[in-house]
Image: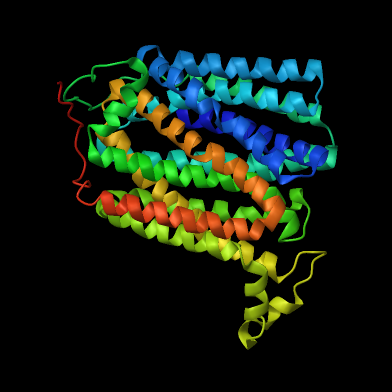
Amino acid sequence: MLSYTRFSSRVAQNALNFGLVLLITEETGRAVYTSLLVLALVVPSTVAGIVAGTAADILPKRLIVVLADVTRVLLCVAFLREGGSTVSYYAFAVLLASTSQFAGTAESAILPAIVRRDELARANAISQAVGGAAQAIGLGVVTPVVLRLIESRDVLFAICAGLFALAAVQALLIGSTAAPDRREVGGEPGGRWWTAGWRAMRSDRAVLHAAVELTLISATVIILSGLIPTYITEVLGVRIDFGAIVLLPAVVGVAAGLRVAGILARRVPHSLLSSAGFVIFVSCLGLLAIVNQLAVFLGGFGMFSWLNSVSIGRFDGGGVIAMAVMLPLGFAYAVVSVAGQTVIDDRVPLSLRGRVGATQAAMAAIASSIPVVAAGALSDVIGVAPVFALVALATGAVAVANLRSGRGADRGPRAVEFAHR
């Protein structure tokens, strides 16, 4: 039931997020405004997220999920009644993101409480798969069909309101959230409540480095999400809604990565798994910056000459290369995400799981807040492809620094121990 409620709410969430991106793009036509929308969707993680994390550790988790879903239903209904403008899109995005923080944080805290420790890697892989499937349906099916075929923004918000209502009912049926085998060592660190998550991370070196990895890959995806609409139109030369099809191989890659990530996370050292994942991820980002040039280059060789004959409207060999690169990109994202999340779920006490998760989300929001706007503004000046290359270089540099400083942090699964000073 946890998977069901996550799926329903995330289909609606992703559909609304992509719908807002399309609506903003149509009204403004500039990448910087799309990046500002992405910022409006992630900034609430820094404030509402910390409050949500504390609530998830103190209050009944299922109740938080239900109330958050009901609130999102009311937000959709209110938007339908009031109509829409560019300013209202941003306001709705902030309110929706703030409310979603409470639901997402509570759901993440429920998972390690209802899953045995030896099944955490597999459970995280399933959780990521649910999120990936919801993203594919929300972005690739619901929003394009409703906004392009039915051509109705109101229908999109009505469908999403129904999905949030369904998620609330499913959350009620999750059942007991008592931990099956978690005997915690230590207790809560002292100090202010809003810094408890950060202190818990710092008390365990492996948790800290896993959190930095998740922050880095999440921040990179957030930055790219603000650039993708412009990338699809400028680099690939196709319409934004059709460009969603180009992103579907990434979903396939995520599914493949999740299939093996749960197994690998229990058998391969975390540092090695993360290193391999980041190498693939960064390499694919760099290739996305030169897909058109790469298509021309490969088209000169006999076995790849067919790339020169690809012409479906404005979709050509560059689009084919982009689709091919999306597959390993999604695979690498899944591997790094599952590896890092499993370390956190295994080593962080349940009494602090909500706050640690919220702190990590806040780290991602802070790390991406300025870059997401800067990347959007820079892409309007020098083009989106060079910005993709810069993001790849920056991600690779930070990943290498984190992996070098994290050597020796991976000592295998154990419960986190807090030393009270």
Left or right: 114 as drawn, with respect to 300 = left
The percent coordinates of residue 302 (x first, y second) are 64, 88
Count numbered badges in the picture.
0
Is residue 271 in view from this perspective?
yes
The percent coordinates of residue 164 (x first, y second) are 62, 23
Vertical arrangement, residue 335 with respect to residue 87, above or below: below
Left or right: 267 as drawn, with respect to 14 = left
Point 37% across, 24% down: residue: 354
- Give the quarter of the image for residue 56: top left
The percent coordinates of residue 246 (x first, y second) are 67, 57
- Give the quarter of the image for residue 291: bottom right
Q: Residue furthest bottom?
A: 302
Point 57% across, 19% down: residue: 69
Point 50% across, 51% down: residue: 254
Point 50% across, 42% down: residue: 219
Left or right: 393 as drawn, with respect to 268 = right
Coloring scheme used: rainbow
Is residue 244 in view from this perspective?
no
Quarter in which the C terminus is drawn: top left
Left or right: 98 as drawn, with respect to 75 = left
Between residues 60 and 369, which one lies in front from this camera angle? 369
Vertical arrangement, residue 360 with respect to residue 294, above or below: above
- Give the quarter of the image for residue 277: bottom left
